[in-house]
DNA sequence: AACAAATTGTCAAATAATGAGATTTTCATT
DNA sequence: AATGAAAATCTCATTATTTGACAATTTGTT
């Protein structure tokens, strides 16, 4: 095991135990000698990933907040989505959320709280299950076949358990249906009593970048015209796409595989 | 230089260039051989601090968002402050911000947007200057003497430039005045045309944990009764303190230096 | 299918990480 | 201010790990 990996174990530990741990606890927990543990801690503190908090305890550091800022500040989808999401909140009285796939995870990247400020289990930063919830379903449905199939292999059981298809052809069919509808709905899948209606956001080359959703209390959802609500969410997604194309900032500059140097 | 340090250089680079860089650029920029660069990248990807984004580029990863969540979810000050800040926004029509010192930095830890959703240069995650702005002034003013003096040594020039005192005694006097007032005001110090009124938040042992502020357009600020606004902010700070003492969650369990093992 | 770029092995030389124990610094308390 | 215990750092010989040139492989595009 590399020292790099060992050092990151400190971060993992701090994330689990969350608040703050003293150096000796960290060393003991991870089985490092005192100097080694202190070296790792010093390194992480120097990087700002850890801070020393009153007395001899260490907690997660400000650099994380700064890096998070860097992500937010440079995410073209987020920039385009925020005003649209505000409008969506205003129009529906629910909350709006935005999620993206990050490698193999689905992560909520923005939560625009509505007047009720619903408590969501999967607010910003909570990794969501890959195969549950309207946002995940959208992200899955519009993924390229190859990735869809890879994920199906990994999550076959969960997919079946969530009635998204007993096998690969059935799953494909379910995804095709979502694509045909243009949106996905989940009722109480992530939080009991809450409904989400989500639609995909594509970039100008047609690949899914994210998904937007409105989240509403079930009672309120039932009072609304479902078709109209879905249309509103899809329209929001389209408006986000449009805002992304309008280069308020520099274009994302997607990298192409280039020819060898001459 | 340790491999740990070198690996973090990758994070630094990604944060600066922000969007995404391909492996070769990273190696070239940092002077690593290709296998070494790839090893570092692989390590960071495994930790989730980096992600592979379409093609051969790497960007900041979802783990950062998750760690940020861990910070937010476990910050007792933030939990106590959020509802109070919402109320402050509702009462004033401005935005509310919360900042804390993290080691040697001052970082905005929460921004509760108001109806105008002001664009602040120092929204969440942007490290703020130590000696400018109402929030920083509060944090400085209520710090223990020792830390105050250390910071004064480091930032003497900036402190002088910002008229917080030409030398240590003058600075101390200025800080004493802020303490006597109970709040700090900054007019256009961080953003031209914006005013911030801030008050300190202490823990039950009396040390400053954070500072809350309302941020308003200058025009609106001038229409308001300044004394009453200051009183409102100070009251908010007190309510946050009170909410922190009310243990909705488990107590923070501050660690004491304990006697040696028997 | 064919190609080029991107990524991952291989392996010996060299460098850097490690831990026991001693030592120094820090800091709450007297 | 002085104290004393805990926290953090230092020293150094031993050992394991990292490193980079080169080759092989995988991946993704035309």
Image: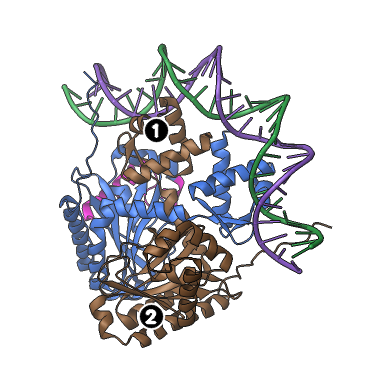
Chain colours: A brown, B blue, C green, D purple
Magenta span of residues: B157-182
Q: Residue at x 22, y 55 (%)?
A: B182
Badge 2: residue crowd in 10 Å (few <14, some 14–19, many ≥20): some
Rendering coords of residue A86 (x, y %): 38, 76
Q: Residue at x 51, y 65 (%)?
A: A75
Question: Which quadrant of the view contains residue D12?
Answer: top right
B254 within the magenta span:
no
Q: Nearer the viewer, mark 2 or mark 1?
A: 1
Rendering coords of residue B156 (x, y %): 43, 44
* Residue closer to the observer: A186 or B176: A186
Rendering coords of residue A64 (x, y %): 43, 51
Q: Residue at x 29, y 48 (%)?
A: B141
Residue at the disc numbered 1 = A30
Q: Which mark is residue A87?
A: 2
Badge 1: residue crowd in 10 Å (few <14, some 14–19, many ≥20): some
Question: Which quadrant of the view contains residue A126?
Answer: bottom left
**Taking B218 as reference, is B251 above or below it?**
above
The quarter in which the N terminus of chain B is drawn is top right
**Taking A12 as reference, is A262 above or below it?**
below
* Residue closer to the observer: B41 or B145: B41
Residue A96 seen from this side: yes
Q: Secondary structure at mark 2?
A: helix
- On the same chain: label 2 and label 1? yes
């Amino acid at each position: 095991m590399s020292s790099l990996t060992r050092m990151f174990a400190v971060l993992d530990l701090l994330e689990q135990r969350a608040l703050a741990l003293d150096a000796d606890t960290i060393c003991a927990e991870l089985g490092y000698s005192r100097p080694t543990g202190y070296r790792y801690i010093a390194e992480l503190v120097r990087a700002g990933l850890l801070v020393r908090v009153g007395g001899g305890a260490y907690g997660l550091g400000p650099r994380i907040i700064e890096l998070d800022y860097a992500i937010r500040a440079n995410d073209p989808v987020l920039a385009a989505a925020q005003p649209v999401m505000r409008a969506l909140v205003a129009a529906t009285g629910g909350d709006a959320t935005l999620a993206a796939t990050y490698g193999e995870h689905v992560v909520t990247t923005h939560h625009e709280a509505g007047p009720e400020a619903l408590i969501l289990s999967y607010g910003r930063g909570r990794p969501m299950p890959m195969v549950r919830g309207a946002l995940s379903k959208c992200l899955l449905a519009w993924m390229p076949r190859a990735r869809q199939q890879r994920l199906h292999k990994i999550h076959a059981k969960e997919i079946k358990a969530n009635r998204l298809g007993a096998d690969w052809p059935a799953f494909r069919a379910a995804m095709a249906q979502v694509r045909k509808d243009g949106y996905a709905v989940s009722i109480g899948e992530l939080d009991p009593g809450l409904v989400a209606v989500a639609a995909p956001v594509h970039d100008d080359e047609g690949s899914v970048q994210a998904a937007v959703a409105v989240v509403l209390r079930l009672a309120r959802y039932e009072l609304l015209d479902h078709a109209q609500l879905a249309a509103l969410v899809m329209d929001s997604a389209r408006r986000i796409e449009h805002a992304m194309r309008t280069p308020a900032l520099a274009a994302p500059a997607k990298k192409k595989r280039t020819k060898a140097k001459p």
